[in-house]
Image: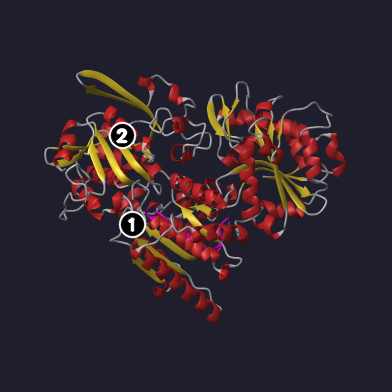
Amino acid sequence: MLLQVGEFCELVENDLNSLVDELSVLTNRQSPYEISAWRNSLQQLSTSLNHPLLSPFHIQLGGSLSLEYNLPASSAWCDAILLGRNQHRPSAVIIELKDWDLSGDQPANRETLILHHGSPYSHPSDQVRGYVEYCRYFHSEVIEGKADVSGCVFFTSAKDATIYKGHPYQAITAEYPVFTRVPYGSQDGLPAFLSECLKEPDQEFAGRFEKGTYVQDRSLIRQISKLIQGDQKTFVLLDNQRTGYELCLDRIDNLLKKTKSSHQKEKLVVIVEGPPGSGKSVLAAKIWAALSHDERMQGNNVVMTSTSSAQKTNWQILFQQVAGHQAGRGVILPSNKYNPGLTTNWMKAERAKGHPVTAQSWRQNLKLFAKIGITKMPDNQIWASVVDEAHALFDPSLEHVAGVQNAGWQVIAGPQAYHIIRASQVSIFLLDSNQSYRDNETTTPDKITEWARELGVPETNIEQINLGGIQFRSGGSKEYVAWVEHVLELNDEPHHLHWRSTPDNVDGVFDLEVADDPEELVDLLRAKHQAGMSARFISSYSRKWKTKDIPDAHNLPPSEKDFFLAYVRKGQKKHWASIWNFLGDDESYHWFIQAPPGSKIHQDPFCEVGCPYVVRGFDFDYLGVLWLSDLVWRKDHWDANFQNVHETAWRLTLSRARHENPRGPATAELIRQLKRGYRILLTRALKGIYLWIEDPETRDHIRSML
């Protein structure tokens, strides 16, 4: 929402309720906490902008303020951005507004974390640093207009933020300072900082900034790609991976030559299929790096497209580590960001005009939306999009998925893969159709091919590559994966147990043990961790996530945690308790994956249980799998225990199955999805899987298969 500063101050003084209502609709954030925070923070911001220090620079006479600015092609929202000019060029100042009570807050061991009310949160200055770096490296107007971008934190309720500025935060707060409320007329604080960054208005720059799009700073992209290209340990390619890699680049070379000779832009779609552990993610990174490092890509965007929040987190962490700073995260473009701009408000307006806007009418919806003439993701905005785990892309147009959760995607926009092809000149999809897990994961190679043809991609520009026959996880054993699929009745191919490492089979390459109880499971994993290996607990959603919104869930009484498992050990009745993976204030899976210093899981890697999405695109040496009676073996077949299925992404399938009497196709579909879920869990470790199976009959069956 772009306003003149004077206009903003007047709204705060005379019509604050309407302003807050508009922001609530804009951001779709409507909690009482958000409303209260806006009311207080906006009043304090208005007071600061009316400060005498800013009067000589005419901030109120034409300076611009963007409220709740959604960074281009990102899910991040900046609370406030002041836009104008400094002494030399356009200038943007990002202000993170924090209406926090700071009482009792303590420093953490890292400059990026703070213990807020006992739980680790991102330090607000680090949050601002992420926004600033994103704008510097991925905002069209900042890059093309050579604008300066700076940032700060404004605590709008606190008068003392000493904890946030002391050790170990001196360096980060020197660059991204922290301010609190100061008496009106004081020569220090936020107004003084703003007066150094902004000297005069620039409404034209403000307008261009507000409409900015995602582009890439080539120097950063080349830096990351060079490091990935040179990392021969993490990103090595073998056999079919190398073939797939060379085929992808060969097809792109041909496309570039054809484009150069004919001056006509053609699209290219490459579909790479492979089973779990076949190296699709490494191949995706190498393809991205090769394209980004190619001098012919000058001025073109090459992105990694993520298909889930967990996968996005994993890729962002990787690229941040490679880049050496947060801007590396901006290379990752969530699939939801390919929506050209269709919103709920637009849908309501069109329906009021008599247009039947539904998920099934998505093609007509796009034609209606095109009449507006404004789009957030234009055709061919991205030169190349590399989509890992493309099987998780959402196709809401299918009749049988009507009503499923949209996971942040506007279902009226149609299939995500369609928009990726539309918005990209080159689209590379890496997928395993058998890993489609949620009700809304409905994208297949055939559908991708269909949409490519619909968008005018020549048949000769649609390539399919298969990575079958190679295995990097599970001790490199294709036979182990085949055994898992056999046990789950996903195939009936011959299998053997030569892969299993036991005292009698020292040549085995993969550990698999079924523990007697959770306590033994912990002992097995802890021994591996103490030997220097990475290890975690994971489980299917066979328990409710009761603690998701509880900030200090680790300290709950055992019976109130997500997992409170009864078992008998040496004749004694016992309980084992734990919580689901902690998400933190940023609702990120990196807490569980990275276990940063200061976090509970850094102290004890077995104090949380990872959900199924945590292991997507990220590997641990050993995994302890809690198999908790959602998928059970009964006599001679697999069955679903409805009361232990709590996967919210299966609500539609579960509801249909519960209403079947006798059990029929919906129950069969639920069992199929449960099997796919366990296939994912059981094929994600590098060296070994340790199991505790709650249901005795199921436990006996698995042991009999060994």
Report helix, strand or loop for mark 2: loop
x, y percent for residue 136: 66, 52
Task: Look at the image and name its color scheme.
Answer: secondary structure
Disc 1 and disc 2: Cα gap in Å? 28 Å
Viewer-proximal residue among 340 and 222: 222
Dot 1 or dot 2, earlier in sequence: 1
Q: Nearer the viewer, mark 1 or mark 2?
A: 1
x, y percent for residue 529: 37, 36
Q: Is residue 357 visible?
A: no
Q: Is residue 560 visible?
A: yes
Region in magenta: 376-391
x, y percent for residue 433: 32, 55
Q: Is residue 351 left or right of residue 532?
A: right
Q: Confirm whether the magenta stretch covers residue 383.
A: yes
Q: Which residue is mark 2?
A: 542
Image quadrant occupied by the N terminus: top right
Q: Is residue 393 left or right of residue 322?
A: left
Location of residue 184 by image quarter: top right
| Vertical side of 395 occupied by 44: above or below | above
Amino acid bearing label 2? Ser
Which residue extends farthest bottom? 261
x, y percent for residue 70: 61, 46
Q: Which residue is mark 1?
A: 278
Residue at (16, 33) in percent of width and height: 697
Label 1–label 2 contact, CB within 8 A: no
Which residue extends farthest left? 635
Q: Confirm whether the magenta stretch covers residue 676.
A: no
Residue at (57, 69) in percent of width and height: 295
